[in-house]
Image (spheres, helix red, strand yellow):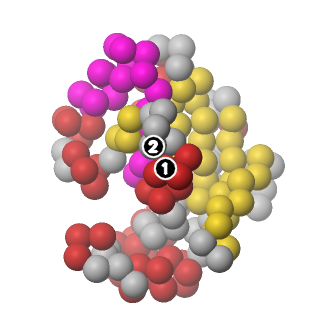
């Protein structure tokens, strides 16, 4: 049983990473799809009740944002794995400018998330923590070293 928590500003590749790495094995929990915290909570509770692995595909910029997911997963004996996506503001704004429709996020939203962003740490309760970078549309994953 595994709970995966993504962390990083918008347009850093989180959803694409989910599709490449977890689509066939984990349920995707995303406010982009579910739209309300109530629905999000119900999906998480269902995954917990059925012992089904899930990925929280949200920005989760702060320790407080991540804490609620870590707590419910740990309480229910899920392994908690975090992935921090390199969050260079200029790169994210550039990638976002290439998006269209609902996928495009207002720049002010990305900048607001960036201001709230705090790096994750093992002491939050992660059993495993990774750092994800993107170059030439390829993801590179490294073990987290509590410094970047």
How many residues crowd around disc 1 within 10 Å: few (fewer than 14), some, or many (20 or more)? some
From the viewer's side, name the closer residue of 54 and 125: 54
Q: How many marks?
A: 2
Instruction: Give the image location of residue 121, x and y in percent.
Output: 67, 44
The picture places residue 39, in percent across and down from the top left corner, at 20, 36
- Which secondary structure, mark 2? loop
14 vs 119, nearest the viewer: 14
- Position above or below: 29 against 71: below
- Residue 105, relative to residue 124: is it above or below? below
Residue at 53% x, 52% y: name it. 20
Asked whether the viewer can see residue 90, the reply is yes
Decide which of tag 1 and tag 2 comes sooner along the chain: 1
**In the displayed structure, would residue 86 be above or below residue 1?**
below
Relative side of 8 to 130, left or right: left
Residue 23 in which image quadrant: top left
Counting other residues with Cα less than 10 Å from the Cα at mark 2, is it few (<14), some (14-19), or many (20 or more)? some
- Position of 102 compared to 21: left or right? left
Q: Quadrant of residue 109?
A: bottom left
Kindly indicate whether the residue at mark 2 contacts the one at mark 1 (C-beta within 8 angstroms): yes
Q: Nearer the viewer, mark 1 or mark 2?
A: 2
As for residue 40 lying within the magenta part, the answer is: no
Q: Residue shown at 69%/35% (left/top)?
A: 128
Task: Give x and y (percent) for residue 52.
Answer: 42, 22
Q: Nearer the viewer, residue 110 or 98?
A: 98
Q: Quadrant of residue 11?
A: bottom left
**Magenta part of the protein: which range?**
41-61
Residue 44: x and y in percent read: 34, 28
Tell me the residue that label 2 is attached to: 23
Between the C-alphas of marks 1 and 2, the distance is 6 Å
**Residue picked out by circle 1:** 18
Residue drawn at 28 percent across, 80 percent down = 100
Residue at image coords 23%, 70%? 102
């Amino acid at each position: 049983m595994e709970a995966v928590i993504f962390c990083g500003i918008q347009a850093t590749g989180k959803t694409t990473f989910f599709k490449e790495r977890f689509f066939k094995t984990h349920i995707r929990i995303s406010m982009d799809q579910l739209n309300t915290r109530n629905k999000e909570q119900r999906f998480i509770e269902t995954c917990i009740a059925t012992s089904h692995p899930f990925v929280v595909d949200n920005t989760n910029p702060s320790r407080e944002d991540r804490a609620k997911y870590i707590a419910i997963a740990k309480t229910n004996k899920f392994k908690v794995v975090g992935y921090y996506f390199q969050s260079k503001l200029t790169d994210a704004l550039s990638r976002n400018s290439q998006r269209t429709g609902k996928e495009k996020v207002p720049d002010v939203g990305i900048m607001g998330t960036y201001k709230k962003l705090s790096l994750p740490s093992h002491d939050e309760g992660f059993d495993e923590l990774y750092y994800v970078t993107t170059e030439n549309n390829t993801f590179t994953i490294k073990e987290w070293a509590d410094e970047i």
